[in-house]
Amino acid sequence: MSSDFVENLVVQTQNGNADAFGELYSVYAKDMYRFALYYTGSPFLAEDAVSDAALAAFQNIGRLKKKSAFRPWLFTILFNCCKKQQKEKALSLQKTELSFANDIPEGADRTLEKLAVKTALAALEEDEREILLLSFIAGYSSGEIGKMLSMKSSSVRSKKNRTVAKLREMMR
């Protein structure tokens, strides 16, 4: 998707064209859902977070000054919505989802692998999980993550490297 196309849709949305926002949403919806799903660990929480983020973005798009920054701005909103969802509901949902782990049929190696990754991600500290997801799923640089989390980019890189090593050890 060209940046000119996205910037044009942002301008149209800021001028009151709701259909233009619908097009913007369709460009990023799949990536937003994938990020939210990895962050929250629950399809239901992910859907809620994406919906909340889309609504907040639509309501606040007039405040966006730099049109070329739409994607990072949108994912920052989504990131905050995911954090909110996680704090409000995720603990009880994760316990429920993990209690069904014994019901997985034998031979479902891929499902067990996904569950292991989900469990390992859930076991990480919140800031570790946030850095990994913002980096590997949302595609942000260490500098961008540092700005979002009020950290130095060198600290983000160090924490990311330590967390990747920790995750590898947990997955053994």
Image (spheres, helix red, strand yellow):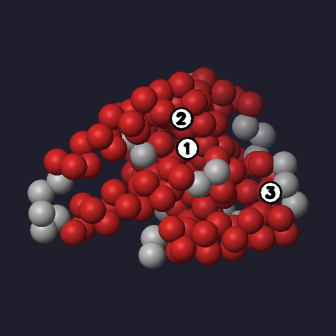
Mark-to-mark CA distance, 1 and 3: 28 Å
From the viewer's perspective, tell me whether residue 147 is left or right of residue 49.
Answer: right
Binning the other alpha carbons within 10 Å of mark 3 as few (below 14), some (14 to 19) or many (20 upward) gives some
State the SS at label 3.
Answer: helix
**Mark sitting on residue 163:** none
From the viewer's perspective, tell me whether residue 164 is left or right of residue 150.
Answer: left
Pick the front one: 129 or 123: 123
Residue that label 3 marks: 146
Mark-to-mark CA distance, 3 and 2: 21 Å
The mark closer to the camera, 2 or 1, is 2
Report if residue 43 is visible in the image.
no
Q: 171 above or below 9?
A: below
Residue in the picture at 40% in, 39% down:
94
Residue contact between numbered discs 2 and 1, judged by CB atoms under 8 Å = no
Residue in the picture at 42% in, 29% down:
92
State the SS at label 1.
Answer: helix
Residue that label 1 marks: 9
Q: Quadrant of residue 22?
A: top left
Pick the front one: 101 or 71: 101
Q: Quadrant of the C terminus?
A: bottom left
Binning the other alpha carbons within 10 Å of mark 2 as few (below 14), some (14 to 19) or many (20 upward) gives many
* Image coordinates for residue 1, horizontal then vertical, percent: 49, 62
Q: 135 above or below 67?
A: below
Residue that label 2 marks: 86
Residue in the picture at 16% in, 64% down:
108
Q: Amino acid at mark 2?
A: Gln
Q: Tally the marks.
A: 3
Sequence-first tag of 3 and 2: 2
Binning the other alpha carbons within 10 Å of mark 1 as few (below 14), some (14 to 19) or many (20 upward) gives many
